[in-house]
Image: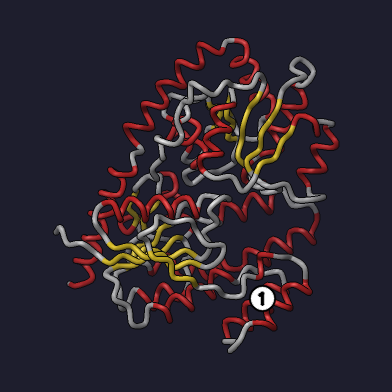
């Protein structure tokens, strides 16, 4: 079956500079387009950056999470014309501490696709009630990078006091919907075997409905740059501020201990600091303000430049469904320290220094080893880049998606 398809890819939010969703949408749409398919993206805000010939269909909603100021949220709600039940639900659910975007996006998506000319929908992890209605009239492939039950688990674990736990319970209340929807989805793709296992277990999904297709890495842009000198003592990590799952606390503690012997050490954090938040307070407590630099809203090229400037990359996550920073660091050809958890060892194979989670001493010790003998670890990093090129090429991966899509369409017709 070599039919050229009209493919819709939906994503409830697709930030181009933060998190992996916008990156995934951009890369997958570009790769499927390169195979000759017509691709359209249906997205809520923030919207993704896309290749010029890829159509963007905006599904704006209220965009309440562009601000946490009540007056500004109220203004967004008041200014919405012809309010639907979803708009009312979204406003009051957010007001009470919930995250309603996923449900309301699914409902709006269902309406957008009511008179669809698409051959298939690829939905990026909404796992919403609307998807169940859509799959009655259109072949659907649901992408689940990992079950958000893992985020909830670690957020609860690091919450202090009953009030914080209640707030987390309220925020993650959409999981009740996802646990109902996931077992009824006919086709799911996930980027790692570890995620497949966790989806089957946490969402009660039959393993036969889950296909493993890894994410690709843009090893053209993320590559060694011989003309860019590495800054002495610079290391790099990617972490959303105050998200326990990323394990940033442990890297910060390692930097504080290393500062005594390496006063010039500098940690570049790709992400945004939350003003007055836990991470900012920890940096002040450890007295390492001068050693930490946050950089956010960077383009892919700018992130690649930061990797090229750095001597070591660190991924200290407590869990990763795939982890673009792992592959991007390896493609950049710099030594990588990563936690030996979830999907990470699937990606790295033997080409990274794998350490236990939640262990700042292991991070400190491994940084010391690399800084003391850079050539030894650089050889492994060079082999790691070859590993990424051989196994995480978006062109090959898009062909795997194409084969799965053809199968889903055929099964839908039967």
Label 1: state its secondary structure.
Answer: helix
The x, y position of residue 316, in whole percent, is 61, 35
**Residue shown at 43%/20% (left/top)?**
382
Report the front residue among 301 and 2: 301
| Horizontal arrangement in the rendering, residue 26 relative to residue 67 (left or right) | left
Give x and y (percent) for residue 179. Answer: 49, 66
Looking at the image, residue 281 lies above or below residue 405: above
Farthest residue to the bottom: give it: 82
Color style of the picture? secondary structure
Q: Nearer the viewer, residue 284 or 321?
A: 284
Single out the residue that lies furthest toward the left: 1
User: Is 237 placed above or below 95 here?
Assistant: above
- Name which quarter of the figure residue 140 lies in: bottom left
Q: Which residue is mark 1?
A: 93
Q: Quadrant of the N terminus?
A: bottom left
Quadrant where the C terminus is found in the figure:
bottom left
Residue drawn at the location 48% of the way across and 71% of the way down: 58
Identified at 65% across, 18% down, the residue is 232
Q: Please state if 330 lies on the left or on the right of 82 as rendered.
A: left
Q: Nearer the viewer, residue 297 or 94?
A: 297
The relative height of residue 245 versus residue 256 in the rendered view (above or below) is: below
| Displayed quadrant of residue 373 | top right
Tally of marks? 1
Q: Is residue 285 left or right of residue 380?
A: right
Instruction: Tell me what residue is drawn at x 55 percent, y 31 percent.
Output: 307
Sort mark 1 into few (<14), some (14-19) or many (20+) by Cα contacts within 10 Å. Answer: some
**390 vs 300: above or below:** above
Residue 274, how many percent across, how many down? 75, 50
């Amino acid at each position: 079956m070599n039919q050229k398809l009209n493919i819709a890819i939906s994503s409830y939010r697709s930030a181009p500079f933060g998190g992996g969703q916008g990156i995934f949408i951009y890369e997958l749409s570009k790769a499927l387009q390169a195979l000759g398919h017509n691709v359209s993206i249906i997205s809520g805000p923030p919207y993704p950056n896309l290749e010029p010939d890829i159509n963007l269909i905006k599904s704006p909603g209220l965009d309440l999470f562009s601000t946490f100021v009540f007056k500004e949220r109220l203004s967004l709600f008041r200014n919405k014309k012809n309010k639907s039940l979803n708009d009312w639900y979204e406003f009051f659910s957010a007001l009470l501490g919930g995250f309603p975007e996923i449900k309301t996006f699914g409902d709006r998506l269902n309406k957008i696709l009511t008179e669809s000319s698409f051959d298939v929908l690829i939905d990026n992890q909404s796992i919403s009630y609307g998807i169940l209605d859509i799959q009655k009239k259109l072949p659907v492939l649901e992408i689940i990078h990992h079950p958000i039950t893992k985020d909830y688990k670690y957020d609860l674990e690091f919450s202090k006091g009953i009030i914080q736990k209640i707030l987390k319970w309220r925020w993650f209340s959409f999981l009740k919907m996802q646990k109902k929807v996931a077992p009824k989805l006919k086709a799911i793709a996930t980027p790692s075997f570890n995620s497949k296992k966790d989806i089957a277990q946490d969402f009660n999904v039959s393993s036969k409905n889950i296909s493993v297709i890894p994410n690709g890495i843009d090893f053209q842009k993320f590559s060694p740059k011989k003309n860019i000198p590495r800054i002495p003592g610079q290391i790099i990590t990617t972490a959303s501020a105050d998200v326990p799952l990323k394990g940033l606390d442990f890297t910060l503690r390692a930097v504080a201990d290393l500062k005594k012997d390496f006063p010039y050490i500098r940690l570049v954090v790709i992400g945004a600091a939350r003003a007055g938040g836990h991470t900012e307070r920890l940096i002040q407590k450890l007295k390492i303000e001068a050693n930490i630099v946050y950089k956010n809203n960077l383009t892919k090229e700018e992130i690649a430049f930061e990797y090229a400037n750095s001597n070591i990359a660190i991924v200290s996550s407590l869990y990763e469904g795939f982890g673009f920073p792992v592959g991007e660091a390896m493609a950049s050809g710099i030594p990588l320290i990563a936690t030996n958890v979830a999907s990470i060892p699937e990606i790295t194979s033997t080409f990274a220094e794998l350490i236990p989670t939640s262990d700042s001493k292991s991070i400190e010790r491994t940084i010391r080893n690399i800084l003391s003998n850079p050539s030894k670890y650089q050889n492994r990093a060079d082999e790691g880049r070859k590993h990424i090129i051989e196994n995480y090429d978006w062109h090959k991966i898009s062909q795997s998606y194409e084969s799965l899509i053809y199968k889903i369409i055929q099964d839908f017709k039967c």
